Structures are given as structure tokens and as C-alpha cells.
Image: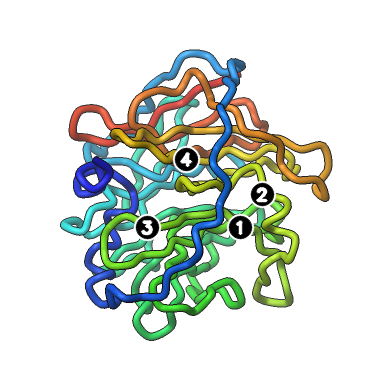
Amino acid sequence: MLCNLSASAFKLAFLVALLLAIPACAPRQADDGAAAPPVAEYRAFGAPQRVAIRGYDGDAMEPFITKDGRYLLFNNRNDPRTNTNLHFAARMDELTFQYRGEIKGVNTPVLEGVPSLDREGNLYFVSVRSYQETLSTLYRGRFNDGTVTGVELVAGVSQRKPGIVMFDAEIAADGRTLFIVDGLFTGGPVPKTADIMIATRDGTGFRRLPASAELLRNINTKGLEYAPAISNDLLELFFTRIPVSSGTPQPLILRSTRRHIEDPFGLPEKVAAITGFVEAPTLTHDGRALYYHRLDGNRFAIYRVTR
């Protein structure tokens, strides 16, 4: 069952400790998402290849390839028993990176994860360091060769409601568009709902796009949608879905496209080459390769597919 997966592997498990401080009677959101239609397959990607991070032998999750291709950003295991922190590695080739250590200036004794970086060097990440005080989890700072300065909360995106946790986000290359994920938690490690939303730059902060629900009407369902990865032109979206299931649900990495940024994304397709317990896609700058994490035995590793 999903809870068993969550306790050991599912990315939301890191919120268990946080949720102990959220009442079990937290307000519940109406479950009005659409049931997911049958998913077609997208077959343009070839066979998966495992990525090597030289000098690092821990779990590697939530990969992000910087827009200049120089760095792989990631976090270690999302688990309440682990101090989840941000790490980085320098590119040697497309399948080999040299570990450079933890990202300096961002990590605390609580969770930091899900890094993404725009082309101007602004790092966005999730941290639960101030949730009890601010009901917010999304931070940013200036990234330079593995060190981050000026860390601050991102204004304007949190719903600031107890039980609603923004646990995933990706900043677009332009630095003006955020794809964010809200989860409704009601006392356990798995959210009741998880949907992707869009926010746009508003001064020094962001605001949720009023048309977000319409633009993502084919993406969000009664299942859980999270881990968005957007192309530079904002026309191709990859994400993870755990569908509604009476058995043991398995995360899927899906792809959706649109012709113009004013259009809704179309019906998603499953990336056929990616199998197993997989999550958290990230697209390279040229759109040719997709990196993601996969559970190999009891260890998470990063893989890559190309088209």
C-alpha cells in the first residue's frame, strides 16, 4: 500500500516529522480533480543509463541539471530519519559527475530539498525550517559555484493555510515562471491531494496565475501530481503522477505539450522508456535528455534517457 512505500521511499515521507505539529483535523479540500483518462505512451526516449557521481555513495534524489550544463544539483534521501540536504556535482560528461559536496549557505538540521536554478543563477528550494511560523516552505538565494547567498522566503506563493504544504517547485529558465505543488496533509505522510500550479513574477515575489487551473486541466487529477519539470520555452512539461489505484500505486513519469503558452497542456503521455519506482524528472537545456531518480534495491540513484 502507499503508506508502506512512503515510509521507506516515497518522496513525501520527509514531511512526517513536520506533520506531527499539524492537527489531524486540518481543513480538508474538496476532492474535485478529474479521474485520469487512459495514458498513451511517448516512445522518443531510448534505454535508461545510470549516472555516476564520483566521490559520493549515498542516495541521490531530486536531480536538477543547471541550464549551462555545468552542475548536477540533488538532495540525499527524503526520509524523516535522515537530515536531507542539498548537494552538487560538476559535469565530467553526460553520465559522469564529480561530487563537490553539500551546497554551502542553504542547509540546516531540518530538510532542504528539490533544487532548481534559473539561467541568472537564482536557486529555488524547499525547506521546512520556518513552516510552523510562516506556513511557507519555498526559499531562494544566489548560487555561485556551490555557495548560496541571500537566502530568503519567496513571497506570494504560499496559501498560508495549516495542512497545506508546498513540497515541490521548479523555476523556469526565464526566472519569471514557477511551477509549484501544493499538498493537503491531514495527519499522515501521504497527502490527500497534490496538484501542480503555476505562478508568475510579481515585483520581487510571485503571484499565482489565475488561469493556472485551466492551463493544467489535463494534468491534475484525483491522483497525486508533483515534481514538475518545464522546458525553456514553457511548452513541454514533464511530471510525476501516482494514479488512483486499488492496488499498490506506482509513480509514473509523464509528458505533456502545448502549442502556445496561453494554451492548456494536452493530455499527458507516459515516458515509455522509464520504468520502476521513478520520480522527479529534470530536462536538459537543449531538451534532448531527461534525468530522474529511481529506486535500485534500497538505494536511490539518478538515471538518464535521451531522444
Which sits earlier in the primary sequence, circle 4 or circle 3? 3
Q: Secondary structure at mark 4?
A: strand
Q: Which residue is mark 4?
A: 241
Callout 3 touching callout 2 (CB < 8 Å): no
From the viewer's perspective, is residue 69 above or below residue 142? above
Q: Which residue is mark 1?
A: 197
Residue 63, given in percent of the width and then of the height, sits at: 43, 42
Quarter holding the C terminus?
Answer: top right
Q: Residue at x 29, y 62 (%)?
A: 15
From the viewer's perspective, is residue 78 above or below residue 297? below
Q: CA distance from mark 1 to mark 3?
A: 16 Å
Q: Which residue is mark 2?
A: 216
Q: CA distance from mark 3 to mark 2?
A: 19 Å
Q: CA distance from mark 2 to mark 4?
A: 13 Å
Q: Residues within 10 Å of mark 2 (few under 14, many from 20)?
A: many
Q: Nearer the viewer, mark 1 or mark 3?
A: 3
Quadrant assignment, res 126: bottom left
Q: Residues within 10 Å of mark 4 (few under 14, many from 20)?
A: many
- Tell me: 196 left or right of 279: right
Residue 32, given in percent of the width and then of the height, sits at: 55, 56
Residue 94, given in percent of the width and then of the height, sits at: 49, 26
Quadrant assignment, res 278: top left
Callout 2 touching callout 4 (CB < 8 Å): no
Q: Which residue is mark 3?
A: 191
Q: Residue at x 19, y 56 (%)?
A: 82
